[in-house]
Image (tube, grey):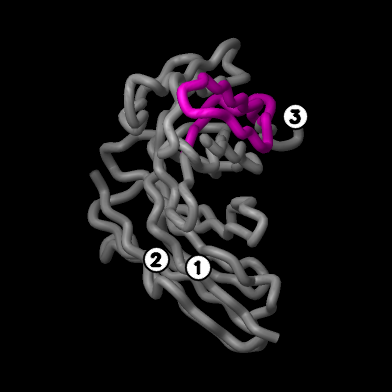
Amino acid sequence: GAGVSQSPSNKVTEKGKDVELRCDPISGHTALYWYRQSLGQGLEFLIYFQGNSAPDKSGLPSDRFSAERTGGSVSTLTIQRTQQEDSAVYLCASSAISGANVLTFGAGSRLTVL
Amino acid sequence: GIQVEQSPPDLILQEGANSTLRCNFSDSVNNLQWFHQNPWGQLINLFYIPSGTKQNGRLSATTVATERYSLLYISSSQTTDSGVYFCAVVGGTSYGKLTFGQGTILTVHP
């Protein structure tokens, strides 16, 4: 697509439920990144994909967080047994070449855990 | 991992004023980007500038990689320049992972 598309744009869930966040990168971009931004804070790296593999997933906060990418395109970030501290905006970005190229961000998915 | 520090944390300007934002980083980098996050949360890439100087309209940026800093210049500021400016880098040994600074919050008053 023309830009990075994320869905849902807004998600409200109850503590303990699982959520899935989706990212559709720019067509042809091989690198895909997930970041998290809590209210008034900077961006916290979660995971990065090159193709379908994840060379760096060091930022995933706990084993409740997982991500996958299929077909070198769409990625899904899954949060199991959500906690209130998971509330944040989850941002996805893609680039044509990992590490050495310009990142284009999506509009984000705002997650609120009640 | 690499550390990124931005200054000042907050900046308030009158429309028409000029400003300089600074980004210091703790290690060599192979990628440095400046972003603007508008009040609606959208992050827009301003510059990809691991070294050298670039200009785009009223904005310009300079990175002195050997001294581990980058500067973003905003001239003749406008109210639409308000938002948060982030510097982000990929450290020499952190292939792919872009580390962000905490940002500079810019408010431009009419």
Amino acid type, residue under disc 3 in the picture: Gly
**Residue interval drawn in magenta:** A7-35
Which structural element holds mark 3? loop
Task: Report the residue marked by disc 2.
Answer: B70
Give the alpha-carbon distance from disc 2 to disc 1, as whole Å: 7 Å
| Quarter of the figure that contains the C terminus of chain B | bottom right
Query: Label 2 crowding class (10 Å Cα cut-off): few <14, some 14-19, many 20+?
Result: many
Q: Position of residue A52 (x, y in %)?
A: 50, 15
B7 or A14, which is in the foreground?
A14
Give the alpha-carbon distance from disc 3 to disc 2, as whole Å: 32 Å
For disc 3, the chain is A
Q: Does the magenta stretch include residue A18?
A: yes
Task: Report the residue marked by disc 1.
Answer: B61
| Marks 2/1 same chain | yes
Amino acid type, residue under disc 1 in the picture: Ala
Task: Please determine whether, in this image, residue B57 is positioned above or below residue A22.
Answer: below
Task: Report the residue marked by disc 3.
Answer: A1
Q: Is residue A49 visible?
A: no
Task: Please determine whether, in this image, residue B82 is positioned above or below residue A54.
Answer: below
Q: Can residue A90 be seen in this view?
A: yes
Sequence order check: which comes first, mark 2 or mark 1? Answer: 1
| Marks 3/1 same chain | no
Amino acid type, residue under disc 2 in the picture: Ser
Q: Is residue A62 magenta?
A: no
Q: Position of residue B92 (x, y in %)?
A: 29, 42
Tell whether A81 sits left or right of B74. Answer: left
| Marks 3/2 same chain | no
Image quadrant where residue B108 sits: bottom right
Q: Do the residues labelled 2 and 1 touch (CB within 8 Å)?
A: yes
Q: Where is residue B14 in the image (x, y as percent from the top left)?
A: 62, 88
Which structural element holds mark 2? strand
